[in-house]
Image (tube, rainbow, N blue to C red):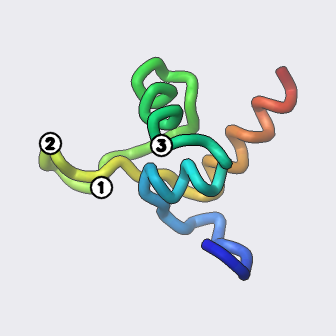
Amino acid sequence: MSGGRLSPRAKLTTAQAARYLHLSQRQMERMRGDGTGPIWFKAGDKINSPCMYEVYDLDVWVRTQKAK
């Protein structure tokens, strides 16, 4: 995530998405729980499958936050 530009389709873990947005991982988890955060998806069917975010969705979420 450092250096070059990420592909809009790149998938990030919660920790990576938090760093990308300059938020804490706990903030990301809280927003995911209350439905105020960026679009996310589960990377698998198991209960412990990680929650993932696409860079495009993170960027869209940031733009919507600026409009508020």
Badge 2 marks a residue whose secondary structure is: loop
- Where 65 sits versus 54, above or below? above
Amino acid beneath label 3: Gln
Q: Residues within 10 Å of mark 2 (few under 14, many from 20)?
A: few
- Residue at image position (77%, 30%) is 65
Q: Residues within 10 Å of mark 3 (few under 14, many from 20)?
A: some
- Where 9 sits versus 29, above or below? below
Badge 3 marks a residue whose secondary structure is: helix
Label 1 – label 2 distance at C-alpha = 10 Å
- Where 8 sits versus 62, above or below? below
Q: Residues within 10 Å of mark 1 (few under 14, many from 20)?
A: some
Q: Quadrant location of the N terminus?
A: bottom right
The spot of residue 16 in percent (x, y) is 51, 59
Residue named by callout 2? 47
Q: Which of 24 and 36 is in front in this view?
A: 24
Residue named by callout 1? 43
User: Closer to the N terminus: mark 2 or mark 3?
Assistant: 3
Depth check, mark 2 against mark 3: the one in front is 3
CB atoms of marks 1 and 2 within 8 Å: no
The spot of residue 6 in percent (x, y) is 66, 72
- The image quarter containing residue 37 is top right
Label 2 – label 3 distance at C-alpha = 19 Å
Please give the label number shown on residue 25: 3
User: Which residue lies most toward the left here?
Assistant: 46
- The image quarter containing residue 23 is top right
The spot of residue 68 in percent (x, y) is 83, 20
